[in-house]
Image: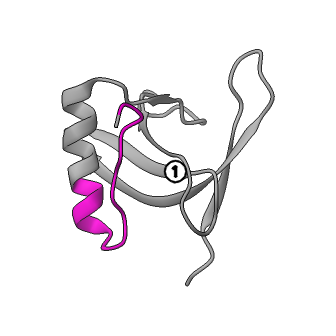
Amino acid sequence: MAKLEKVTFNPEGEEPVEFFVLEQTRIGGYNYILVTDFEEGDGEALILKDISKDGESESVFTIVSDDKELEAVAGVFESMLDDVTFVSDEE
C-alpha cells in the first residue's frame, strides 16, 4: 500500500489536527477530500469541502454535514475506492 499524504489542519482556537488523505475529488466546482485519523485499518473518516476563494494561498476546509451533500459525495468516494464503506454515527 502506498504511503498516504498527511495534512495538518489548524482549527481556530484549537490544537492542530493531523489527518491522512485517502482520496480527493472535484464536484460542482468544489474540491472535496476524504480524510481519516488512522493510516491503516478502520478509523474515523471525514469528508471535507474546500471553501477557499480562488487565488487564496491557503485552503479553508469545512466538514460536510448536509445530509444530501454528504450522501452524494460519499457515494463518489465509495465508487472510487473499492475497500471503503461509509457508516454513519447514527447506525
Residue 20 position in % (x across, y down): 61, 57
**Could you tell me which quadrant the N terminus lies in?**
bottom right
Q: Say whether residue 47 is left or right of residue 37.
A: left
Q: Is residue 75 above or below residue 3?
A: above
Inspect the magenta stretch and tell me whether residue 83 lies in it: yes
Looking at the picture, the colour scheme in use is one colour
Q: On screen, 67 above or below 8?
A: above
Q: Quadrant of residue 47?
A: top left
Residue 76's quadrant in the figure? bottom left
Picture residue at 48% right of the left edge, 61% below the top: 22
Tell me where residue 21 appears, x and y as whole percent. Answer: 54, 57
- For the record, the magenta segment spans 76-90
Q: Position of residue 89 (x, y in %)?
A: 42, 34
Residue type highlighted by circle 1? Val
Q: Residue at x 44, y 51 (%)?
A: 34
Is 86 drawn above or below residue 13 in the view shown? below
Residue bearing mark 1: 35
Query: Which of 38/5 is in front?
Result: 38
Viewer-proximal residue among 37 and 7: 37
Quadrant assignment for the C terminus? top left
Decide whether the magenta segment is chiefly helix, strand or loop: loop
Indicate the quadrant where residue 79 lies.
bottom left
- Dot 1: few (<14), some (14–19), or many (≥20) neighbours within 10 Å? many
Residue at horizontal 56 percent and vertical 54 percent from the top? 43
Residue at coordinates 53% horizontally, 31% vertically from top-left?
56
- Is 58 left or right of 67, judged from the image as shown? right
For the view shown, which residue lies furthest in the top direction? 13
